[in-house]
Amino acid sequence: MVHTISNHFTKKVAIIGMGFVGSTAAYTIMLDGVASHVALIDKDKNRAEGHALDLMHGMQFTRSVQVDAGDSFELVKDARVVILTAGISQKTGQTRSKLLDSNVSIFKQIVPQIIKYNKDCILLVVTNPLDIMTYLAFKLSGMPSCRVFGTGTVLDTSRLRYLVGSALQVSPKDITAYILGEHGDSQFVWWSHANIAGVPMSKIPSCSKDFLEEIHQQVKNAVYEVINRKGSTYYAIALVIAKIVKAILLDQSRVFTISTVLQDYHGVSDLCLSIPTVIRSNGICRKLEVEFDNDEEKMFKICAKKIKDGIKETKI
Ligand code: NAD
């Protein structure tokens, strides 16, 4: 199904997987008004087409955008960014790691299909377990590492800023604090460099060690709090996806804690983890070298070991 509105210039984005995350991301990208062309792909053609129709029925209120939909990977042709959300998601009581086997076999099927039609895109991985799936996409695609990355701990970082902001009554926008490492249970807060308007969090009287630990536990449990109540998470991750896509399409040089292929970074290599990274129209242009205190260094190594073990399980 192809509906042409206008095609004078294209800032095309393709989304693979039209479930909760993919469809909400399509909606959010459309509201952002930056993409001129969105392709929606799912193995369930009807679902992809249904979402396309639903989105286009609102076009009176958004910028005009060309929306294509179907089950053919040919639809990724000419896309600047291809977003991978295909796969199964966490169920109540499940960790992200439990999804590995099913999602690995889906990626082994779909990544070569994407490359067949578009070797020049940026691959943005959203499917969990995120860091392992990002590394798998990098390996299966054969693309340079600057063009294959995952949403990483951008969502966790947003949750952290929201929770710190609510507790201290400061806007999340004015809190500089990051979750680094795994998008999963071994993630950690880079507290040694967290600050509000330059004031280190450790110097703020209400930020006791117990308070910081409690906030971190809440960030780690945030996904389960949502899944236990409504089955899946999709609004916040859709906003994350849309902001990363915007940074690419508008060449914004934004810093995000995306999951990226690391080589000799704090002694770890050949895996994906989240660190602050600068993104431009060609993908990653710079990985920032961060300073860790002793505890953070240890936690980073724990994340690395967990992801390395996971990568081994995929047998790539
Ligand atoms: P969902 O089950 O609602 O949707 C998955 C979609 O993928 C389905 O529509 C399915 O038909 C499609 N699909 C499966 N195999 C396919 C194939 N071979 N080709 C094309 N389409 C295929 O799941 P969801 O809630 O949208 O979650 C998707 C993924 O995103 C999960 O792995 C979930 O854990 C992950 N997720 C990641 C984050 C993050 O921060 N990175 C946040 C939320 C969810």
Image (cartoon, rainbow, N blue to C red):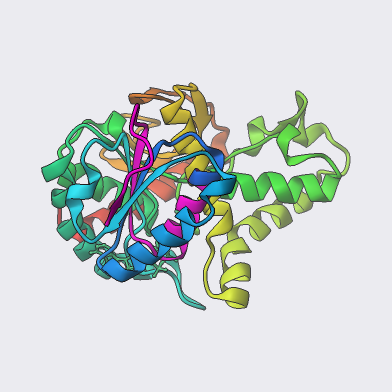
Q: Quadrant of residue 121?
A: top left
Q: Quadrant of the N terminus?
A: bottom left
Residue, x 67% and y 59% (percent of image)? 218
Residue, x 73% and y 41% (percent of image)? 172
Magenta highlight on residue 16: yes
Q: Quadrant of residue 62?
A: top right
Where is residue 303 drawn, in percent x and y? Answer: 42, 49
Residue, x 51% and y 78% (percent of image)? 92
Magenta highlight on residue 123: no
Query: Horizontally, is 39 left or right of 29 in the view?
Result: left
Where is residue 38 drawn, in percent x and y? Answer: 37, 45
**Front one among 220 and 203:** 220
Query: Horizontally, is 102 left or right of 208 in the view?
Result: left
Where is residue 299 drawn, in percent x and y? Answer: 50, 46
Q: Quick check: which quadrant has ligand 1?
A: bottom left
Query: Which residue appears farthest toward the left when viewing the image?
Result: 116
Is there any visible trace of residue 277 in the rendered image?
no
**Front one among 189 and 147:** 147
Magenta-colored span: 1-29
